[in-house]
Amino acid sequence: MTALLINRKNYFAGAWQTSDSGRTFGVLNPATGGLIGEVPDCSEAETNRAIRSAQLALPAWRAMAADERSRKLKKFNQLIIENRKELSQILTTEQGKPLAEAEREILYAASFVEWFAEEARRVYGRTVPGPTPERRIIVTKQALGVCAAITPWNFPCAMITRKLAAALAAGCTMIVKPAPETPFSALALAELALRAEIPPSVFQVITGDAEKIASALMSSTSVRKLSFTGSTEVGKILIRQSAQTVKRLTVELGGNAPFIVFEDADIGKAVKGAMFAKYRNAGQTCVCVNRFIVHESRVEEFAAGLCSASSALKVGNGLDSGVEVGPLISIEAADKVRALIEDALSNGAKRLSGENISAIGPCFIHPTILSGVNKSMRLWNEEIFGPLCAISSFKTEEQALELANDTEYGLASYFYTKDLSRAFRVAEALESGCVAVNDTVFAFPQGPFGGMKQSGYGKEGGQEGIEEYLTTKYVMMAV
Ligand code: SIN
């Protein structure tokens, strides 16, 4: 790639740098398997320098008037929007999602920067009457300090800005370790942040050895918080590691979203919603539907609608015009989805449509629909992360809820009904941090996104988002 925003160095300690060892690692285009470029393979020493630098940059950034921080974030937002074509090109090339979807992600990423630029000016404290006449209790909010983020490949820009903008708005500095599959988007954001005159070392990007970089971040007493989006397995390791320095965490982990279609649902709307909630990013989001749970009286109608809409989707290289479903991120990821399909078929599921093997390339899977899915199958308990629709059926509302909540995850749930009482009842009973009723979109900065159960804790977005980077101080004032 020869784009202007492509940077093959890391940005830390006030400069664009290579790794100390000079080692690099390659980044592949999942659509073609071709090498896009190499980035530095950094380790503990470089991370420790970034931490020191973030600490040095902290006092001035934290002390800056909130209005001024807000202005810089607004400039950053504007630059992301102005450069959205180039950013989308980078994103599609390294991540695979169709170009139009990549551009929507860039605008989504920018929307977090705009939102938190506004929130920066609304970090309020309060005064509480004291227990005796001469006492006043003053409650203030202060920036936590140096923060870190470990971000995933499925939203190479938006999952960074959702953390970064909240941290910077609160007055914190942040070091980001992007996923090895998608470093170029992160490095492009670092370049734009510098152009927005966000001071050097307020935002730094380090690529390289995940374990070593994480170990340096987690053992540092200067790093006061880590925000992580990724697997529950890695999240648990980070939770354990955070104990050594009592670090604050936001962990946005795996999902296993149910999508319930009640007997009174508008099937046309449910199918339309399902298409978005299943195929966004080729099924590779933590909030993508994992299990369709459809009333037995409507299951055939719903499945037929889903088959017909799914078979019309154009699969291919995200850079080609009209493509709606791109490749999965890697051959291993595609092989896992193929294994889930085979496991379900061998346990009694029926294939209604779709193919496992694609002539386009090894990372591609064509939208696949299975019916007759049940709890004995791996896809009931494992996150699918691919364009595979798994349909099961139910008889009663109670049974639908039992099936929907039959998972250790608790990030997102969807359901379709026209019954208002049921809408409230079911929304309250679903064990997940985000619930959509007759809708499927959570991708807005206004909402406090996050899970419960083993999907993690902490919120990103909403008024809660900035709180994650603030600490509350209680001042007892005798006057
Ligand atoms: C995810 O974390 O995978 C989903 C993020 C989003 O929907 O914005």
Image (spheres, rainbow, N blue to C red):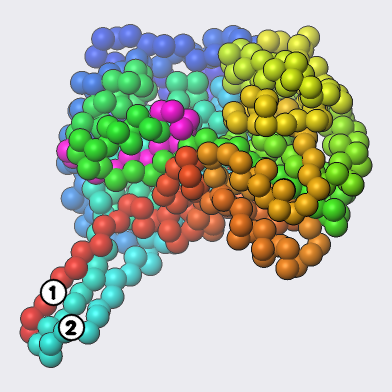
Q: In which quarter of the image is ligand 1?
A: top right
Q: In this view, does 133 lie above or below 67?
A: below
Q: Where is residue 221 in the image (x, y as percent from the top left)?
A: 17, 38
Q: Which residue is drawn at 73% across and 68% down?
A: 421
> Split into 4 quadrants, where in the image is the C terminus?
bottom left
Upstream in sequence: badge 2 or badge 1: 2
State the residue at coordinates (87%, 49%): 267
* Contact (Cβ within 8 Å) of mark 2 with mark 1: yes
Foreground residue among 348 and 47: 348
Residue 231 painted magenta: yes
Nearest the viewer among 457 and 111 is: 457
Q: Residue 130 carries which label?
A: 2
Q: Can residue 204 be seen in this view?
A: no
Residue 38, horizontal then vertical, whole percent: 44, 13
Query: Which residue is rendered at x = 78% and y = 35% of the image?
Result: 391
For disc 1, the marked residue is: 476
Q: Specify the segment rendered in magenta.
A: 221-234
Front-lying residue, 430 or 18: 430
* Quadrant of residue 225 within the rendered picture: top left
Give the SS element for disc 1: strand
